[in-house]
Image (cartoon, coloured by chain):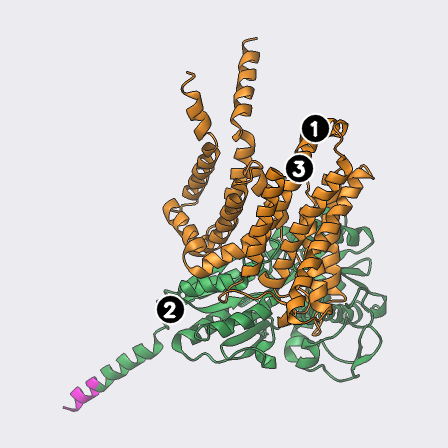
Amino acid sequence: MHKKVLLLLALTALVLAACGASTPSGENFTFGVILVGPQNDHGWSQAHYEGGQYVVENLPGAEMIVFESLNPADKPEATLEGVVDEMVAQGATLIITTSDEFEEDTTTVAAKYPEVTFVNVSGDDALTGEGPANLSNIMGRMEEMKAIAGCAAALTTQTGQLGYVGPLINHETLRLTASAYLGAQHCYETYRGLDADDLEFTVSWIGFWFNIPGVTSDPTEVTTNFIDTGVDVVLSGIDTTEAINVAGQRAAAGDAVWAVPYDYLAACDNAPDICLGVPFFNWGPDYLALATAVVDGSWTQSWVWSGPNWADLSDLDSSAVGWLNGPGLSEEAAADLADYISKLASGEVAVWTGPINLQDGSAYIAAGEVGSDEQVWYLPQLIEGMNGPSQ
Amino acid sequence: MSSKRPFIQRIWPLLPGLAALLITTLLLMGMGTNPVDAYAAMWQGAFGSSARLYSVLAFLVPLLLAASGLLLTFKAGLWNIGIEGQIIMGAIAASWVALRVELPAGLQIPLELLAAMAGGGLWALLAGVLKTRGGVHEIFGGLALNNLAILFTNYLIAGPWQPPEGGSFRGTQTFGAHALLPLFDNSRLSLLSLALAVLAFAGVALLLTNSHWGLRLKALGKNARSAFLLGVSSQRELLLAMALCGALAGLGGGVRVLSWFDSLRQSISGGIGYLALMVVLLAGFRLVLTPLVAFFFSAVLNGSITLQLRTQLHSALGDILTGILVLLVLLFGNYERVRNALQKRRRAQHG
């Protein structure tokens, strides 16, 4: 008798365990991803596209609908609202709009479809309370990765001149560009023993996230111009890969130049030999968590600033942002960079440590203090010592 | 032989269309998609619901306005490539009123639309004067002015008209509700603007077919020198044609900012002017065909949004279809020309 009861209990436990452990099913779950650029740009948009694919691979049965290149220059006939209408008609219950360009329109359209979950990447309407209850924001905590990028550049430069190809000016681009500068300064001084004030760091804003002929400055020309004026490491802050492409061509022609691309894991592939590494977004894990939460009904409004897995910056299952060394990074520089990364990881060094003044000379973060999340997120200008416009 | 010719001639204009359809179908099959599904998706995207149809009509308004204007300039023998910039300057002028002027309800919107027409008209006039006084061909002058208009937009967005919360390159601060065109049934369509576009087209048609001025333009377009000898003042007619075309294009730009969007955006036209050029070329400069072709373009482009979402094919398919169509029509659309060319070749071959 006892045996039978035990057996029954064991069986029940097994069944329960099996139920509990089963992966959530994405059957009948459709989600939409709206991209500002093409899905194969080797940059920002492709990183999001592959984040969506990660969901499809890890949430069995889930289906993704993608709309690419939604911007008035490429698609004057399309609006975010029209695309969302169609996605909802196709059954999408989660829609991710992956640009700050979509922030306002996402908030408007989210109010129109209260039963659909919306996520705007890089916005702050869920933080400020401007967005309706079915809207979240997410962004990768890219600041330290940009500092690592700046460090790699400072460890490599021979001319002491770094160039940053920036998109347009807003809080996000200001803080990322400034982070790269802070990392560069730190490493120039700490590892090379040089005066950080001698490091030239110039930002050139092209006017948009990617090149629109006739509308923005041409990033190819901007990069060429940098190299012609003595810059030997070009960092990219735009969605596409012109900086590394041009640097690769110039290196092939005999110039001693390097590049640090941005956004996309495999961006170094465009010119591996001169690539010092890439700070990249890895949206997959966060998108999967979002999709799973929508499927099982546990989703709640949030504003997420998702950080790296410091134990392994290249772990694609856990790190929302990361850094990969490129083949162009020398062994010596790689050793110093590894030391910098480990100190960031342990908290021994913080990127945003004062004294930090704004470009106009006003004090922003006092000596010895570390900038708060809010101070970093809403950085109003470039910081003192950087060349280039703040507005 | 001779009894066959009229038939060929009659169906000839359809052939480029059929050929374009065939090429697109092959392209779709090459991409591994069932073309029937693809066309069905496009159809539904354009006409599948009333909301879709409103969107097609809303995009049609500036396109038809610009195309109507181009009928005038083409008639005068002008290549008004600068139409893109004229749309943009119309949008800028309308935005200026929307942002900086506050009038009683009945005056606000008329003033915005008038400003749009003035903005586009003056910009076109500039291209015209560059041609008549400066000897700058309207194609080059127009292209330069297009770029200037874009740069001006970018300056306004990034500078004086940027939203109070700070710079984004997306657009200026949003206009107040009083400044926006009333929208129909939660769509982007303003019935007022649609009515204006239809009126504008009818006016252009009337001018071209039933007015002395239309005849003079035609004489100018056919042969500027002999028209001059016949006493048609070419400068005045050219400038007037440009200004009218620019005014209509500018009105289209105004409609873009006041109803399609709610602020001045970067790439506010996004190539609608160039699209209008394709419309008029495809229509073979014929009055009746122009609004039909414009409607067709708007439907194809709107339909291709749904096409991309349903099939996940390359998103430029709508552009590819319209592009192939225009190319084929330009190459083979004119039966007489094709026949003459063939005969010439045959004669050359036979020595």
Q: Which residues are magenta?
A: A1-8
From the top left corner, tell me how far across and down residue A375 is, in percent.
Answer: 70, 80
- In the picture, which quadrant includes the N terminus of chain B? top left
* Marks 3 and 2 on same chain: no
> Which lettered chain is shown in orange?
B
Residue at (37% x, 49% y) in the render: B37
Circle number at residue A26: 2
Give the structural element (helix, strand or loop) at label 2.
Answer: loop
Label 3, on which residue?
Answer: B212
Label 1, on which residue?
Answer: B223
Residue at (61% x, 44% y) in the render: B204
Chain to which mark 1 belongs:
B
- Front in this rendered view, residue A156 or A147: A147
From the top left corner, tell me how far across and down residue B157 is, in percent.
Answer: 72, 63
Q: Main secondary structure of the magenta part?
A: helix
Give the structural element (helix, strand or loop) at label 3.
Answer: helix
- Front in this rendered view, residue A57 or B308: B308
Report whether B191 appears left or right of A200: left
Circle number at residue A112: none
Chain to which mark 3 belongs:
B
Distance of label 3 from label 2 (alpha carbons): 69 Å
Q: Relative to residue B140, is residue B5 depicted above or below?
A: above
From the top left corner, tell me how far across and down residue B54 is, in percent.
Answer: 49, 59
Residue A69 is a magenta residue: no
Distance of label 1 from label 2 (alpha carbons): 69 Å
For label 3, count other residues whose C-alpha is less than 10 Å away and answer few (under 14), some (14-19) or many (20+).
Answer: few
Find residue A338 and report its image quarter: bottom right
Chain to which mark 2 belongs:
A
Report whether A153 appears left or right of B325: right
